[in-house]
Image (cartoon, rainbow, N blue to C red):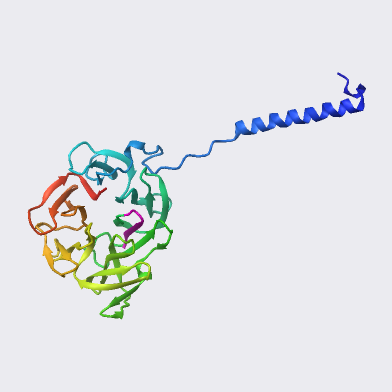
């Protein structure tokens, strides 16, 4: 059709219709070509996301697999009784802890430069926050509400028996985003005075149910101390000597920890302290335990115990009675949800 031969008003109408038509086609093309919004990333082994059925569920006992099995280094979920088939979450961590739908995974990153990181995940194992750190993962803890997360890394040495070892402990408030990368940023008091020393090391944090008060270990000049901290006030105070890796009971009345009581190769034994009376009780575990215990329930603590080629999770009553019981083989870093 010869458009130039048509009347002027008709040519204008045809041009307007053509412009609108081509514009509509362009919009449809762009909408079809636009990529879909990415789904929330899930932290898992390899590139595939963790399946939904491996979400953190109440009643599970969460551990990291150990030994020569294919699940070594992977977070597993098993019934709290320790019986039944473990379910793999696909999450690979050196240390792991979880409470109230919040998980904390400590791991070493591989790349041009080897580093470490603390990764907070939600109840479906989706990454919520990542903190780049340095060193070897040692301890992980989450408060009962799931709000507060704490970690410990070796920045020199890889054992509490190492000569000249150095640790760094940090705390993250997952609700406000407040991050303290090292407890050395807080003020420490000993015998009513501010205590400063160039060799201070902190490790093994545990939280009270108010998400503010916490307990931890500090060492200086070869001595270790149990400290109580106030996160909001940025202050800590020494409570007693010779207590490491504390773990507060669910009711907040007792702290379980390890004490140096044995020889140089097997120094640690488990104790529980009543915070009200100050009475200390030796637990009925005669073996050396180099771990931060966790509470299986209000009466029982659980912990990992090393053997030649692996480690296992054991339990013992927290009142000094009974005897140790094997809960789960080839596992460590237990957490009861």
Q: Residue at x 35, y 50 (%)?
A: 102
Residue 54, percent from left and from top: 32, 39
Q: Which residues are magenta?
A: 145-155
Is 83 drawn above or below residue 131 in the view shown?
A: above
Residue 256, percent from left and from top: 19, 61
Is 280 drawn above or below residue 299 in the view shown?
A: below
Query: Between 157 and 118, which is closer to the camera in this rendering?
Result: 118
Q: Residue furthest left?
A: 322
Residue 288 appears in the rendering: yes
Q: Is 3 on the left or on the right of 196, as rendered?
A: right
Residue 321 falls in which quadrant of the image? bottom left
Residue 272, percent from left and from top: 16, 63
Q: How many marks?
A: 0
Find out whether residue 154 is within the magenta segment: yes
Q: Residue at x 87, y 26 (%)?
A: 11
Q: Is 272 on the left or on the right of 77, as rendered?
A: left
Residue 75 falls in which quadrant of the image? top left
Find out whether residue 208 is within the magenta segment: no
Q: Quadrant of the N terminus?
A: top right
């Amino acid at each position: 059709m010869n458009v130039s031969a048509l009347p002027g008003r008709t040519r204008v109408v045809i041009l307007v219709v053509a412009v609108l038509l081509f514009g509509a086609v362009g919009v449809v093309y762009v909408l079809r070509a636009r990529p879909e919004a990415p789904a929330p990333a899930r932290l898992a082994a390899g590139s595939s996301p963790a399946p939904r059925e491996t979400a953190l569920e109440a009643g599970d006992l969460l551990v990291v697999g150990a030994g020569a099995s294919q699940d070594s280094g992977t977070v597993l979920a098993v019934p709290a009784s320790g019986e039944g088939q473990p379910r793999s979450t696909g999450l690979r961590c050196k240390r792991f802890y979880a409470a109230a739908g919040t998980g904390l995974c400590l791991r070493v990153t591989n790349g041009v430069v080897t580093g470490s990181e603390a990764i907070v995940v939600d109840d479906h194992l989706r990454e919520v926050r990542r903190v780049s750190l340095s060193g070897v993962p040692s301890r992980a803890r989450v408060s009962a509400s799931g709000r507060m997360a704490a970690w410990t890394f070796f920045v020199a040495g890889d054992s509490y028996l190492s000569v000249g070892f150095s640790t760094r402990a940090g705390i993250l408030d997952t609700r406000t985003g407040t991050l303290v990368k090292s407890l050395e940023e807080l003020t420490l008091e000993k015998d009513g005075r501010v205590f400063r020393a160039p060799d201070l090391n902190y490790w093994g944090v545990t939280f009270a149910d108010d998400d503010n008060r916490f307990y931890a270990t500090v060492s200086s000049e070869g001595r270790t101390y149990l400290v109580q901290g106030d996160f909001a006030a940025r202050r800590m105070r020494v409570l007693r000597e010779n207590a490491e890796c504390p773990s507060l009971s669910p009711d907040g009345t007792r702290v379980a920890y390890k004490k140096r009581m044995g020889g140089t190769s097997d120094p640690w034994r488990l104790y529980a302290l009543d915070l009200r009376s100050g009475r200390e009780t030796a637990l009925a575990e005669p073996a050396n335990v180099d771990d931060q215990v966790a509470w299986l329930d209000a009466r029982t603590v659980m912990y990992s115990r090393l053997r030649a080629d692996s480690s296992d999770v054991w339990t013992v009553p927290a009142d000094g009675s009974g005897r140790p019981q094997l809960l789960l083989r080839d596992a460590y870093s237990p957490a009861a949800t």
